[in-house]
Amino acid sequence: MTAEEHGPRDVAAAMAEAATAWIETLDEAQRAEGVWHWPGSPAADRERVRWYYTPTDHGGLTLHRMAPHQQRVAMRLLATGLSEAGYVTATTIMGLENVLDRSESFSAGFARDRGRDPGMYYLRVFGDPRSGRPWGWRYGGHHVSVNHLVVEGEVAASTPCFLGIDPAVSPLLGNRELRPMGGVEDVARGLLHSLDAEERARATLSATAPVDIVSGNRVRPSGGDRLIPLPDLWRGHFDDQPLEDRLWSAHNGLEAKLGVTDADHRAVELTDVPKGVAARDLTPSRREHLRELLEVYIGRMPPGLVERERARFDGDLLDEVHFAWAGGAERGEPHYYRLQGPRLLAEWDHTQRGVNHAHSVWRDPVNDFGLDVLAQHRDAHHRSG
C-alpha cells in the first residue's frame, strides 16, 4: 500500500484490530476497568473527555495490572495512534519515570505504593471496535495523553495529544545527554531568534513565563482561559491532605520564584483572536521555520493521519497561524510559547524543576475529542431514523 492509499480508514482499521486483540485477552475484572460501554452511556460520555497529564488516576486498566502478553497488545494499540518518532518519544517519557524516581530519592508516593511508576499508564477503550458504531480509546499516564475517536470507520479526532518530560535533560555515558523533547524547544527558540526586532516585540507576550501550559486539561479551551493551578489538575478530591498541601506549595512557590503577577497571567491568557506574530507577516524563510515548528506537533501522528493535518496548513492556509513567546530567550531560562490559529492550539512550557521539566500539548479547539463530529453523526442518524 502506498502512502497515498494509506489514510484515516486504514489507520482506524489497524486501531480496531489492535483494540479488539487487546480486549479479547482481558478477564471480566480487567474488562470492567479497561472497556466502557459507549456510546449511549452518559457516564462514559463524561469520562471519555476527562484527561490528565499529572501522576493521577487517568482512568482505565494500568500496565502493571496486565500480563506481559496483554501489555504487548496495549503498546501495539498505542503505536497505531502515533508516528514512529511520537511512539519513541512517548515510551521514552514512560521509562523516565525510573529516572525521576531516582532523582526524588525513590520517595514519591501520590497516595499509592510507588508514585513514579512506568507501569502506571492507563488504557481504556470506549465502545466496541467491531460494532460499526463510534468508538474511541485513551492511553494516558504521567506526561502522556493520547486520544483517538473513530466514526464510521475513519479516525475522526486525534486530540488532545499531550507529551511532557521530566527530567528534560539527563546525563548519559560518554559525556552525552538524553534530551527526548529538545527539538520541541530548539526549533521554537530558533524561530524566535530569527525574528527582527518588530516581529519579536509582537511575538513576546510577557517577560515572565507561566508555570504551565495555559489550556491545562480543559475539555475545550477558549478565550479568557487562564492557567489552572497544579492541585486542580488531579482527578477528584484529595483524600491525602498533606499531598494537596504539597502541590499547592509547589505551585505557589514556583509562581513566587518566577515572579508571576496577575498582569503576566492576563498577558498569556487564551484569546479567541490569536496573540503573537502571524505567519502571513513573516518572510518566506521564517514562514518555513514556523511550518517546521508546527510539524513538531502534527508529526506526532502516524502515516495516514499526518497528511490530513499537514493539508490543513498547506500554502497560504498557514497565514493565520500565530507564534507567541513568554519568558527568557536562551536555553536554561524559564520560557513558554504557543502556536494558535484555525483549529490549532499548540503549547510548550519549560519552567518547572529548575527548567528541567517541560509540558507540551497539541489541540484542535474545534474538534478535540471529536465532539462536533459526534454531534453531526448523531443528528444524521436521528434524521435518517
Image (spheres, rainbow, N blue to C red):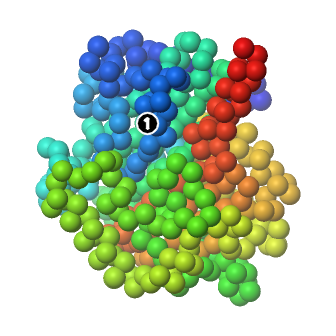
| Residue for badge 1 | 47
Q: Is residue 304 above or below residue 237?
A: above
Residue 209 visible, this angle: yes
Q: Residue at x 63, y 49 (%)?
A: 364
From the viewer's perspective, is 314 left or right of 222? right
- Three-letter amino acid code at the position of disc 1: Glu
Q: Is residue 279 left or right of residue 372?
A: right
The answer to whether one can see residue 180 in this image is no
Q: Residue at x 21, y 66 (%)?
A: 246
Q: Secondary structure at mark 1?
A: helix
Q: Residue at x 52, y 60 (%)?
A: 215
Residue 283 location, quadrant? bottom right
Above or below: residue 155 compared with residue 103: above
Percent x, y of residue 30: 29, 20
Q: Quadrant of the C terminus?
A: top right
Image coordinates for residue 231, horizontal then vertical, percent: 31, 60
Front residue of this view, candidates 192 and 258: 258
| Near-viewer residue (383 or 115) | 383
User: Residue 278: x, y in percent?
Assistant: 76, 70
